[in-house]
Amino acid sequence: MNAIQMRRGMAPSLEGRPLLEVSGLAVRYPLVSALTARLLGIRQRFLDAVIDVSFALHEGRTMALVGESGSGKSSLGRAIVGLQPFAAGHVLFEGRDPFAGRRGGNSTYHRNVAVMFQDPHSSLSPRRCVRALIAEPFVIHGFRERDLQAEVERLLALVGLPKEFAERYPHQLSGGQARRVGVARAIALNPKLIVADEPTAGLDVSVQADILNLLLSLQQKLGLSYLIITHNLALVRHVSDETAIMYMGRFIEQGPTAEIFAAPAHPYTAALLAAQPKPDPDQRRTEAPLLGEVPSLLSRPSGCEFHNRCPRAQEACRRDLPDTYRPTPSRMHRCWFPLGGV
């Protein structure tokens, strides 16, 4: 039985306080200075990339952030790990605010929360061998008393690479091998949470499956929680417990992955699911296609920001931003006319 099959049988408990709690988070990027805005009469000084995002992630669980390019997924992930300041909201880790009094988060938080970047090769310094790359977290966090040679070999074994790989350089690694080195770096300090940005991007399908099985196997062994940022819905279906759909910086649907795939409430979610390849060549598509492109964040549509691409849009959609609806304790959506009347 592989790790994906084991994952389907898992049902981690949701009792107790969440590992990660995000409340009302907002990320905005400055476009011009206050002085320039005043001199030129510019009203919009900021680009809002993430708006009022809230969610909770429990220990041992996997949550997926899904959306098209520019939806705010990576900005949200970077804000959570302290790589991007946020303009409003709170992040709690094990019930504590890691950013209280410190902009980028405290050192304990950065030992407990690791990052896997999207491009495995570009995230590895080409001037350093694999041994130095994997040992780097121990050096940065002051664990110089550790037997770094033994730690590197232990981590290489955990990610399925022979110890001889310690002497290689990034240019000598395939995409899958470079990703495994990135995983080894991420788990070096025994974190509780890994934020993985497109963990299978640029990999062959067979290698993607190997990496997914590795991540899920490590979750079983080490008790890891994952926040996965992706547009790959096949990945989401197999590995995530919870899914949040983002559009123009907002969560527009959120809930258990199985429920969302079985009965999406938001037309955007349904369109994303419909766009996925179907294995049966004789099965005709009956779902409405996803029309147009994501509007510019500098020129947000009025009302529901999806209305100019939505086949179900009505006057209320063009006029008013939908409220947050919670049809069940585990489901959320922002839509005036949800599918199935949810």
Image (cartoon, rainbow, N blue to C red):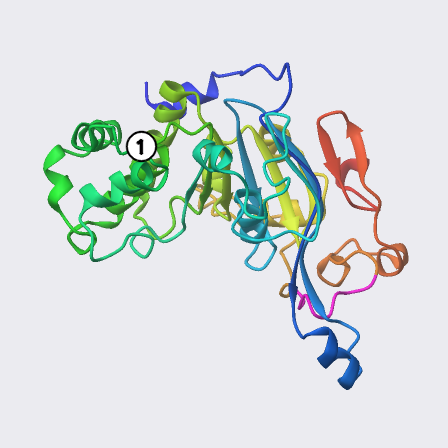
Which type of secondary structure does the marked residue at label 1 adopt? loop
In the visual, does 304 lie left or right of 19? right
On the rendered structure, is 316 left or right of 91? right
Instruction: Please state the horizontal and vertical placement of residue 169, each as a whole percent of the image.
Output: 16, 51
Residue closer to the observer: 234 or 59: 59
Disc 1 marks a residue whose amino acid type is Phe
Q: Residues within 10 Å of mark 1 (few under 14, many from 20)?
A: some
Which residue reaches farthest bottom? 40
250 displayed left or right of 195: right
Residue 207 seen: no
In the image, 86 versus 11, the foreground residue is 86
Above or below, comparing residue 237 to residue 336 in the picture: above
Q: Position of residue 62 (x, y in %)?
A: 51, 30
Is residue 56 visible in the rendered image? The answer is: yes
Bounds of the magenta segment: 295-302
In the foreground, 151 or 306: 151
Q: Which residue is mark 1?
A: 143
- Image coordinates of residue 4 in percent, x first then y, are 39, 26
**Residue 74 versus residue 13 in the image, above or below:** below
* Rendered image quadrant of residue 311: bottom right
Identity of the residue drawn at 38% across and 45% down? 200
Assign the C terminus to one quadrant of the image: top right
Judge whether residue 296 is colored magenta.
yes
- Quarter of the image with the N terminus is top left
